[in-house]
Amino acid sequence: MLGDEALSNLGICCPNIEHLEFDDCAFWFETLELSKFPKLKKASFKGGQQHSRLRNVNNTGTNQLESFHLCIFNTEWVINPDNTCSSNIKNLELYCSVNVPSLFEDLTTTFPLIEKASINGLDRMKASNYHLKSLDLSFVNSLKKIYVDCPNLNDFSYSGLVLEELYIDCPKLIYFRYSGCKKIPTFIYLNVPTTIQTSIRFNFSVPSGINSSWFISLNKFVEMIGVHQHVYLHLDVCRLELAEFILDEFEATQIFQNNVHLDLRIIYSCNIQNSVALVDGLIWSIHPSTLSIEGGCYEFIKDLCGKLGIKKSEDESCCEQQESCSKYWWHNIKDFEVKHQDKDMKEKLISLPELYQDYQGYKPRNKSCFKFHWRSCINLIQNSFILH
C-alpha cells in the first residue's frame, strides 16, 4: 500500500529520480502527481486496481519524460495539451483513458519524437512521423479511419470493431497485423515492401449470417490486398446459421492473381447447404494461393474435395472459346496439391472428409492444406449485385 505522503517524501528526499516503476501496487489516493519528480525520464504503472484508489496520473510539469507506460484500466492520464510535457516522449504505452480527446488526432504534433506507441481506445488517429518505428492500436472500437505515413515504421498492429478506411504508407514495414472482428474495411491502401521479409496478416470472424453482399465485400477487399506478396487471411467461423451464395449468378473478369494464403478455422460444424455456399463464396471471393482448414469442417471438406475431383470435359459450354471458365471456379484450377498432417492426400481425395466425420471438438492438429495452381489470372466478381 502506498500513500500520497510517502510518495511526496520520496520526491523530496530523492529529487533527482529519473525512473519510477510500479507493478500491481495499491495506491491510497486518487491522483498521482508526477511533478513531485521534476527529473523523471521513465515512468511505468501496470497491474490491476484491486484494493487501489488510483484514478488519475498527472504528468504536468514532467518536461523531461521520455518513456511513459500507464496500463491500469479505470484510470485516466492527465496531460497538459500545451505539448511541453509530451515533446520528449519516445516510448508510449497506454491502456487507459486520457483527459484530452484530441490528443492522438495528430500523433506527430503531440509527440514529435515518438518512436514506439501502443495505445487503446482511440477515436481518431493520424501519424506522419519520421521517428516512429512501432505502432500498436488495440481495442480501438470506435475508430473508423487510420492514416499512417511513417517512412521508418517497421511494425504495425491493429485490433478493433468498426474501422472503414486504412491508409498505410510505410516503405520499410516488416510486420503488419490486423484484427477486425466481423468488419471488413471498405478501403485499404498499403504501400509496403514487396520483399519476402514483409508479413501481412489479417484476422476476421465470419458473421453468423452471410449472403452474396458479404462475399462481394470480401472480394473487393481481397482485390485491394491481393497484389502484395505473403498476405495471410485468417477467418474464424464460430456458428454459421445462414450462408447464401448462388455461384450461377456471377460471371468472371480478368485481374491479377491474388497472393493470398487463406487460413480457415471452423469452430462448430455447419449443415451441408451452408457449407456449399461457404465453399463457393470463399473460393469465388479470394482465389487463394493456398487454403489451410481445421475444425468442424466435414461438410466443407466434402464439398471442396467433390468439386476438385470433377473432371472438366472438353465440350463444357461455360468454357467455350475462352481460356477461363465464367461460371465454375474449379474449372480454372490447372492443378492442386493437398496434404493432411503432412501426408499427401491427392490420390486419396475421396477419403479426406472421413478424417473429419467424427469431429467432437476443436483439434488444432487436425488440419488439411490445399495449394491451388490457377489456369489463368482471373477472379470472379458480381454480375447483377451492387455493393452498398
Image (cartoon, rainbow, N blue to C red):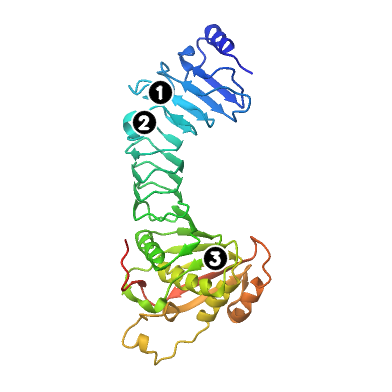
Q: Is residue 170 above or below residue 221?
A: above
Q: CA distance from mark 1 to mark 3?
A: 47 Å
**What number is the disc on residue 236?**
none
Of tags 1 and 3, the one toward the viewer is 1
Q: Is residue 35 above or below residue 214?
A: above
Q: CA distance from mark 3 to mark 2?
A: 42 Å
Give how far across and how far down residue 133 sits, in percent.
41, 39
Tell me whether the residue at label 1 lies in contact with that at label 2, contact meaning CB atoms closer than 8 angstroms: yes
Name the quadrant containing residue 152: top left
Which residue in the structure is indicated by mark 2?
103
Q: Amino acid at mark 3?
A: Ser
**What number is the disc on residue 79?**
1
* Residue 371 or residue 11, whichever sits in front: 11
Q: Is residue 112 visible?
A: no
Which residue in the structure is indicated by mark 3?
292
Q: Quadrant of the N terminus?
A: top right
Q: Amino acid at mark 1?
A: Ile
Q: Amino acid at mark 2?
A: Leu
Q: Secondary structure at mark 2?
A: loop
Give how far across and how far down residue 326 sits, in percent.
35, 80
Of tags 3 and 2, the one toward the viewer is 2
Q: Residues within 10 Å of mark 1 (few under 14, many from 20)?
A: many
Residue at the image position 32 percent from the left and 84 percent from the top: 322
Q: Residues within 10 Å of mark 2 (few under 14, many from 20)?
A: many
Name the quadrant containing residue 259: bottom left
Q: Secondary structure at mark 1?
A: loop
